[in-house]
Amino acid sequence: MDNFNRGLFNTGAAHSPKCVDNHIMHYFRTSANYKPWHNASDTQKRNEIAKKAYEAVLTVITRLPSGDHYKNFSAHVKQIAEDEFGYRYEEESVNPYVASFFEGFLVYAAALNSTLKNGASITDGRAIIKNMWNRTFDASVGPAWFTGNISIDARGDRKADYSLLDMNPLTGIFE
């Protein structure tokens, strides 16, 4: 990615109003990737070239949850990671995909409960899926969700929320 952006800069394409380089990042680390153009082991000149090239970059990321419930979950996961596995997080929060996987289990549990209340079997996967799809899960069917209500469409796809970040050319930080 870095070499591609430097190439855009070196050819002059990064300065064209028609040039926008889109990046889709599955996880945006809050400390290291606020300035993804910066390489601590590179020269200042090359970092300045990379910074200039990144002015043409728009980055799409999964929206980071910000509520107290997510912060508590994140703190709990960090504590377990350190106590059980000796792993110490350097990031301010846990990867939002960890929370999404956890929420996925909670959605499954809510759908399973609905299935059992309707008299279907725990082994009837189609009935469980039917209770997941085309439905919005809110606090009435489970705990407060980290990312707000969870909506699953008629095809079984979760409706997601994303952020579009652009680099502030003065600070070099993606906002």
Image (cartoon, rainbow, N blue to C red):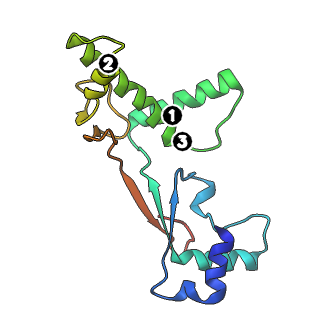
Instruction: Please identify the quarter of the rendering in which residue 109 is found.
Output: top left
Q: Nearer the viewer, mark 2 or mark 3?
A: 2
Q: Secondary structure beneath disc 2? A: helix
Q: How many marks?
A: 3
**Residue wearing tag 2:** 112
Give the quadrant of the N terminus.
Answer: bottom right
Kindly identify the residue that appears in the image at 25 percent across and 24 percent down: 141
Q: Nearer the viewer, mark 1 or mark 3?
A: 3
Residue type (three-letter) at the residue carrying disc 1: Ser
Residue 74 bears which disc, if any?
1
Tell which circle, 1 or 3, labels the residue nearer the N-terminal end: 1
Tell which circle, 2 or 3, labels the residue nearer the N-terminal end: 3
Q: Nearer the viewer, mark 1 or mark 2?
A: 2
Instruction: Please identify the quarter of the rendering in which residue 108 is found.
Output: top left
Residue type (three-letter) at the residue carrying disc 3: Asn
Q: What x and y, as percent, mark residue 163?
A: 40, 58
Q: What x and y, as percent, mark residue 111?
A: 30, 23
Q: What x and y, as percent, mark residue 89?
A: 64, 38
Residues tagged 1 and 2 counted as in contact (Cβ below 8 A): no
Q: Is residue 7 above or below residue 60?
A: below
Residue type (three-letter) at the residue carrying disc 2: Leu
Q: What x and y, as percent, mark residue 101?
A: 47, 33
Kindly identify the residue that appears in the image at 66 percent across and 69 percent down: 2
**Residue wearing tag 3:** 95
Q: Secondary structure beneath disc 1? A: helix
Q: Secondary structure beneath disc 3? A: loop
Instruction: Please identify the quarter of the rendering in which residue 55 is found.
Output: bottom right
Mark 1: give few (<14), some (14-19) or many (20+) Cα within 10 Å: some
Left or right, residue 108 beside residue 139: right
Mark 3: give few (<14), some (14-19) or many (20+) Cα within 10 Å: some
Instruction: State the CA–CA distance, disc 1 to disc 2.
Output: 26 Å
